[in-house]
Structures are given as structure tokens and as C-alpha cells.
Amino acid sequence: MAVLADRYGRHFPYLRLSLLEACNFRCSYCLPEGYRATPGLPAPLHADEIARLLRAFAALGMRKLRLTGGEPTLRKDLTAIIALAAASPGVEKVALTTNGCLLRKRRAEWQAAGLTALNVSVDALERERFARITGHDRLDDILLGIEEALAAGFPSLKLNAVLLRGLNDDQIPAFLDYLRTRPVSVRFIELMQTGTNRAYFERHHLRADALEAQLQADGWQPLPRAGDAGPAREYAHPDYRGRIGVIAPYSRDFCAGCNRLRVTAQGDLRLCLFGNVGIPLRPLLQHDDQADELQATLISQLGLKALGHGLHRGETGLTPHLAAIGG
């Protein structure tokens, strides 16, 4: 079987598929003014197009799918898409990243449809701080939804928190307390510069490697990385039920372990989150008999994947904000 691999020997069993660009939150690091639709933007991929896309990727070795946005739960057919993905031959894990706005209302049906992993964005554990960062006073409802998911035995549950100097860096002790009794993972994500947040980045960027050094000094031990794992380096501590993941895109070896590809809501393949080129796949998603051509396109494009991103040089590529591609 052909596999998704590049010229540097990296394999890509992990696909991140954006379902739409729209988001109903106004996170200060992403969409501080709220989402504004791009004039003339085509509609997101339809379910039948998604089905063909997933079959092609799975035939080439994709085993883990993450549904992202924008805010993917705003799609009315999300549950059907989860079921479609879970039933796709070769797909072993179906994950979802969400701001949690519909977690309490929809989690049970997502789980029944085949969702196996859930990441919820929680940038602070203090209500006022959360509202300041996200533009919405929804923390209590989101945390209750997480507790309900835990009580229901959800297979994999993670909280995502973007590290923001001067905004939430003093919340780290609260997150550690949260992890002491809960079998979840908190992933601290280093703020990344995008096309629209340069001034914000310069004010609030906090190096993730400093956090990692402190964690190890406090007895947190690094864990082995699974082949289809996301970009986080995970740590465990014997006194805590939960784990910590650190996503450090500015670390020296970050791209060496890249194992994921991205497809935008409109069907463009992105070889890198901060790449300069989007390869349109949608024309090859219209008929079942295009499968061979689609797979050949994926294989050939991977031969062009760069060794690393250009963030250290301030090169943010096509990404105006993370909602545009799903982070």
C-alpha cells in the first residue's frame, strides 16, 4: 500500500480537516473583532466530498482524523460527518476541537456517532479572565460540559490553553490543581504569529520551553510520543491524575516530528500550517472515479513539503488567523 510520506522520511497518519471558517467566539489571539466572512468564499465541503476525501487519505495510510474550524460545532451536519468519518475504512480515531459552546447539548450524540477524542479550548479557569480572552462569559457551562463528559467515560479528553504573557500565564497553578484529580490532559500552546496578530504576538508571546523547563524541575516527566499523536510533548507526574502537553512551535526540533496534514474547509491541501501554497483538491472530489487521481495528487504534493516552517523569520504564510485553517 502506498503511504503518505515526504522526502525527509516523515509519515502522515494524521489529517486535520476544517469544516468551516466561522466562529462564534472573539478570542483576542485569533478573531478579536469576531468572524467576518470573506466575500466570495466558496461553501465548505459537502458531506459527499468529505467522504471521498477521507477514503483517499485512508487508502494512503491516514488513521487519525481531527475535525476543526473555525468552530466546527456550528455545522448542523456535524454529527452526520462524525458518523461518516467513524465508518470510513481505515480511520481508527475521530477527534474534534471545539470551544465547547455546544458541548453539553451535543456531546452525547457526537460520542454515539463515533467521536473518540475531544479537545476543548479553555484559556483560563477564572471566569472573568476567560471572558476577557474569549469575548464570552461561558466558562462555567463549558467546565460543566467537561465534567459530564468525564462522568460519561469519554475516551480521550483534553483542554487547550494558549499561553499568553500578561493575560493567563498566572493561571498555570490553577490548571495544575485542576489536573490533580481529573484524568484529562491540559495542552499549553505557545502563541504563534499569524498574518493579522503581529502587535498582539509581540505583547503576549511567552516561550513554551521556559514552561517545560519549570515542569521538569517540578518533577514532571516526559512521555514517549505515539506515532499518530498531535504536536504536543506530554508530561506526567505521580501526584497528578492528569497530564500536561506542551506545543512549542518555536522550539528547534518542532517540525522534525511533523505527522499531520491539513485540508481547509473549501478543500485546499495545506502541507504546513504556515505554508505559502494551498493545493485545491475540491475538483477531484466530485466523482468516485476520481479516487486514483486524487491519491496520486496527494503523493506528488508531499514530495514538495518543506523541512520546516518560517515562523522564526516572521514568515506566517497564507494563514491570516488560526480560524482560517483550524490551527
Image (spheres, grey):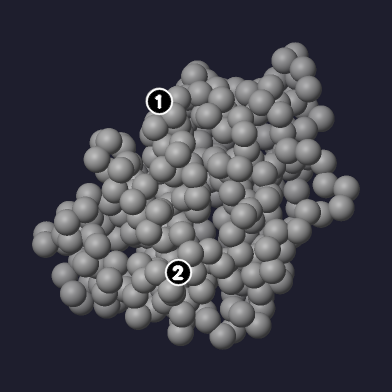
Give the farthest residue toward the right.
Answer: 40
Residue 227 is labelled as none
Compared to residue 84, the image places residue 71 above or below, namely below
Question: Image quarter for residue 185?
Answer: bottom left
Looking at the rendered image, the quarter that the C terminus falls into is: bottom right
Which one is in front, 125 or 222? 125
Are the residues flagged by discs 2 and 1 in contact, CB closer than 8 Å? no
Amino acid type, label 1: Ala
- How many other residues sit within 10 Å of disc 1, few (<14), some (14-19) or many (≥20)? few
Residue at 69 percent of width and 69 percent of height: 33
Q: Residue at x 65, y 82 (%)?
A: 199
Residue pointed to by mark 1: 112
Residue at 48% across, 64% down: 137
**CA separation, marks 2 and 1?**
30 Å
> Residue drawn at (26%, 57%), measured in percent from left and top?
243
Residue 168 picture location, percent across and down: 42, 76
Residue 70, position as x, y percentages in the image: 62, 51
Q: Point out residue 215 in the picture as x, y percentages from the top left corner.
A: 25, 72
Which residue was labeled with disc 2? 130
Judge the density around disc 2: few (<14), some (14-19), many (≥20) Cα neighbours within 10 Å.
many
Q: Earlier in the sequence, mark 2 or mark 1?
A: 1
Q: Quadrant of residue 296?
A: top right
* Front-lying residue, 188 or 296: 188
Q: Amino acid at mark 2?
A: Phe
